[in-house]
């Protein structure tokens, strides 16, 4: 049975940050796969289904009429698009399965109905079900599927307050027909439970980020007046981000500007403690990132060393390199293989020294070579080979 339909149950909303699932699924859609992406966000049921389309993405907000809509939308995804289904939270599925509370049971049932009605609307028959979030397991195991794929992106037990997820993940690993792992540690752990585990690291949309090298894009207004040299970071600022390290380096190097681009999902120091040469620009559109990276003199990955980050393969590493930007990082195991192109630091002093050296020496060709060897296009080809074996 040749897999050409994918039902992807995600841990992140499609509109949050453009990450690994977006790249892989968009790439597979262009190669003829038909894809429904189920958002994890919670919503109150609508009376009438709302459909909106933009840039190859059709968003479905399910209403009471969803099972009765005409099937005129069926041909949409044959053109290489992705359907995003706004959904109820996967937590509801977990609570319903564990605690047997009636109201959660009905919520889980309504979610299953929404998914099945969407599959029917777009002519899905027996898709492969993918997930990167074990909380979905109680819902997905009741849906017809030809294969179960687990995209193991993180050391999931390391997220705070999630001890309950461990038994669900173990169950998912054992049940999966295929497991894709982003990092060596995740691969070794999954392989000990299931021999259908493969190392498929993160990568980069090379052509997109290389615009920072090739083009002369307009400089965004919010970075234009920031004095150079600019030491930059793109991505989420979460609990794994070492804010103390950043503040220490910035305080001791007032001649450098530190620009942080991305949403902040953790508590950070009071503004009185933030040196004036740190600039938080907030979340920016993925498609504008090369314009910002063009202004970076050095890209940084200042992560704490924790069980979570020991199993992290940062997408931003490949994006910095594709933009021709030198990189300084803390000691993440997945990054060691790219020495000496990456400067690796154990403390603030070494990190500052790494930045100083990077400012004095740019080896753009070696950065581009690393990025070119790690493209999402290549990852999609690897994944298609693995799917064909199922």
Image (tube, helix red, strand yellow):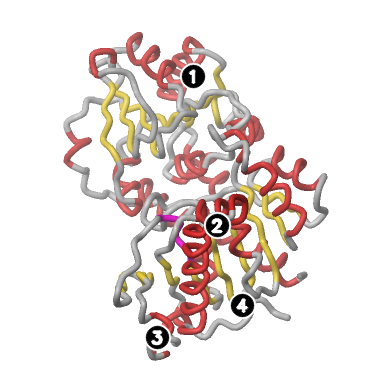
Residue 279: % across, % down: 26, 27
First along the sequence among labels 4 and 2: 4
| Label 1 environment density (alpha carbons within 10 Å; few <14, some 14–19, many ≥20) | many
* Magenta region includes residue 74: no
Return the residue at label 3: 73
Numbered tag placed on residue 199 in the rendering: none
Residue 76: % across, % down: 41, 82
Q: Are marks 3 and 2 in contact (CB under 8 Å)?
A: no
Q: Are marks 1 and 4 in contact (CB under 8 Å)?
A: no
- As drawn, the residue found furthest toward the front would be 102
Place residue 362 in its image quadrant. Answer: top left
Return the residue at label 4: 4
Q: Are marks 4 and 2 in contact (CB under 8 Å)?
A: no
User: Magenta segment range?
Assistant: 37-41
Return the residue at label 2: 93
* Inter-mark Cα distance, 1 to 3: 54 Å
The image shows residue 43, relative to residue 328, as above or below, that is below
Residue 289: % across, % down: 34, 47
Nearer to us of marks 1 and 3 is 3
* Inter-mark Cα distance, 1 to 2: 47 Å
> Is there any visible trace of residue 132 in the rendered image?
no
Return the residue at label 1: 354
Looking at the rendered image, the quarter that the C terminus falls into is: bottom right
Q: Are marks 1 and 3 in contact (CB under 8 Å)?
A: no
* Residue 218 or residue 309, whichever sits in front: 309
Nearer to us of marks 1 and 4 is 4
Looking at the rendered image, the quarter that the N terminus falls into is: bottom right
* Residue 6 or residue 31, whichever sits in front: 6
């Amino acid at each position: 049975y040749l897999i050409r339909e994918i039902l992807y149950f995600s841990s992140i909303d499609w509109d949050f940050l453009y990450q690994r699932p977006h790249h892989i699924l968009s790439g597979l859609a262009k190669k003829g796969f038909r894809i429904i992406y189920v958002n994890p966000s919670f919503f109150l049921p609508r009376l009438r289904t709302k459909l909106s389309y933009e840039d190859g993405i059709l968003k479905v907000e399910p209403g009471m009429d969803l099972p009765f809509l005409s099937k005129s939308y069926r041909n949409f995804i044959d053109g290489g698009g992705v359907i995003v289904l706004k959904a109820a939270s996967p937590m509801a599925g977990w609570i319903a399965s564990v605690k047997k509370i009636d109201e959660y049971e009905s919520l889980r049932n309504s979610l299953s109905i929404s998914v099945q009605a969407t599959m029917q609307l777009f002519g899905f028959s027996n898709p492969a079900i993918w997930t990167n979030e074990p909380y979905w397991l109680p819902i997905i195991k009741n849906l017809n599927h030809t294969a179960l794929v687990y995209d193991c992106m993180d050391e999931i037990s390391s997220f705070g307050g999630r001890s309950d997820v461990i038994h669900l993940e173990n169950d998912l690993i054992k049940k999966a027909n295929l497991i894709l792992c982003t990092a060596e540690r995740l691969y070794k752990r999954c392989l000990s439970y299931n021999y259908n585990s493969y190392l498929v690291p993160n990568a980069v949309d090379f052509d997109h980020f290389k615009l920072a090298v090739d083009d002369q894009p307009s400089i965004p207004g919010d970075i234009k007046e920031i004095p150079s040299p600019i030491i930059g970071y793109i991505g989420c600022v979460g609990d794994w981000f070492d804010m103390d390290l950043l503040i220490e380096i910035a305080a001791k190097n007032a001649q450098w500007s530190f620009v942080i681009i991305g949403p902040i999902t953790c508590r950070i120091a009071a503004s009185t403690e933030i040196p004036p040469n740190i600039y938080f620009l907030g979340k920016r559109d993925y498609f504008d990132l090369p314009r910002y990276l063009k202004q970076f003199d050095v890209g940084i990955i200042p992560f704490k060393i924790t069980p979570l980050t020991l199993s992290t393969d940062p997408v931003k590493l490949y994006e910095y390199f594709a933009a021709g930007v030198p990189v300084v990082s803390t000691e993440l195991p997945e990054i060691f293989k790219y020495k000496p192109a990456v400067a690796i630091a154990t403390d603030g002093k070494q990190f500052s020294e790494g930045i100083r050296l990077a400012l004095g020496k740019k080896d753009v060709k070696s950065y581009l070579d690393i990025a070119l060897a790690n493209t999402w296009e290549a990852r999609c080809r690897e994944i298609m080979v693995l799917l064909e074996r199922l």
